């Protein structure tokens, strides 16, 4: 029995919808945490409302990711599915911190922010998730890699929105930054791990 390739439409649509919703939500007026250079987390006094916002976006992404990738996760096997979950949980934790820190930076950053390594937030989880299913079909690896974006891209967009907010006029800039530094690295990672491996040449 030949299994059909997992559909990419559902995770891509979920990524786009949740990403836009997170950007709009982040551009509203939210209470801000304090920037704390004396703390290992660099943030303190996070308001409960902000925790609910960031945690809600993370949980929505995790739920949507698991739902839209159920066929790919089933095809990849239990070990690969567990690896995917571990990767997205770690990525979500990193991006939750980034969103909270961005909210704290909002009051202190002057001028344009120059992103240096932000593109790694979506690229690295995509590559690692694909590698968790290294023995699976390339289409499955590609789906698992892209599926990390259902979690990472909305949180990425939220972080930039919290940094840029609280004016909805900043939405085009947040969307553009999310596409360039979030969605494109995600797609590059999925393309990298989704390549079909060449068969080994027979030894002479």
Image (cartoon, rainbow, N blue to C red):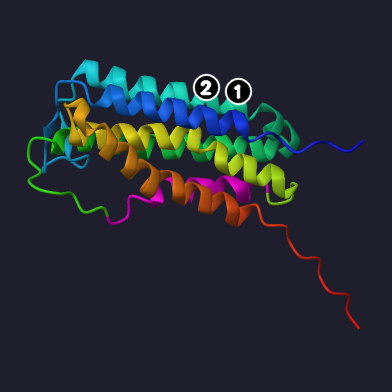
Q: Which quadrant of the view contains residue 91?
A: top left
Residue at 91% x, 83% y: name it: 204
- Secondary structure, mark 1, is helix
Q: Residues within 10 Å of mark 2 (few under 14, many from 20)?
A: few
Instruction: Identify the residue at horizontal 22%, vertical 39% (top origin).
Output: 41
SS at badge 2: helix
Identify the residue position indicated by label 1 in the image: 67
Circles 1 and 2 in contact, beta carbons < 8 Å: yes
Q: Position of residue 51 (x, y in %)?
A: 27, 21
Residue 165 position (above or below residue 183): above
Magenta segment boundaries in residue numbering = 116-133
**Res. 99 visible in picture:** no
Q: Does the magenta segment cover residue 123?
A: yes
Looking at the picture, tell me which residue is in the foreground, 120 or 186.
186
Q: Nearer the viewer, residue 23 or 38?
A: 23
Between 65 and 157, the one nearer to me in the picture? 157
Quadrant location of the N terminus in the rendered image: top right
So how many labels did they put on this image?
2
Residue 160 lies in the magenta-colored region: no
Asked whether residue 6 appears in the rendered view, the answer is yes
Q: Position of residue 186 (x, y in %)?
A: 48, 47
Indicate left or right for 117 with 33 as reference: right
Taking 159 as reference, is 129 above or below it?
A: below
Q: Position of residue 68 (x, y in %)?
A: 61, 26
Disc 1 residue crowd, few under 14, some 14–19, many 20+, Cα 10 Å: few
Rounded to the nearest angstrom, the CA distance separating label 1 from label 2 is 6 Å
Magenta span: predominant SS is helix
Q: Which residue is mark 2?
A: 63
């Amino acid at each position: 029995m030949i299994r059909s390739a997992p559909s990419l439409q559902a995770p891509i649509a979920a990524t786009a919808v949740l990403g836009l919703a997170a950007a709009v939500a982040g551009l509203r007026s939210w209470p801000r945490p304090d920037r704390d250079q004396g703390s290992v987390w660099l943030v303190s006094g996070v308001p409960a409302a902000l925790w609910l916002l960031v945690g809600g976006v993370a949980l929505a992404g995790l739920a949507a990711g698991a739902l839209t990738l159920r066929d790919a996760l089933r095809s990849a096997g239990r070990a690969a599915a567990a690896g995917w979950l571990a990767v997205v949980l770690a990525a979500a934790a990193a991006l939750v911190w980034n969103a909270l820190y961005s909210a704290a930076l909002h009051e202190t950053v002057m001028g344009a922010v120059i992103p240096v390594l932000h593109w790694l937030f979506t690229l690295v989880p995509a590559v690692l998730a694909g590698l968790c299913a290294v023995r699976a079909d390339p289409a499955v690896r590609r789906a698992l890699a892209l599926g990390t974006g259902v979690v990472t891209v909305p949180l990425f967009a939220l972080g930039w929105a919290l940094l840029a907010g609280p004016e909805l006029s900043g939405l085009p800039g947040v969307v553009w930054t999310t596409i360039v530094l979030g969605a494109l690295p995600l797609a590059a990672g999925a393309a990298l791990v989704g390549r079909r491996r060449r068969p080994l040449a027979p030894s002479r």
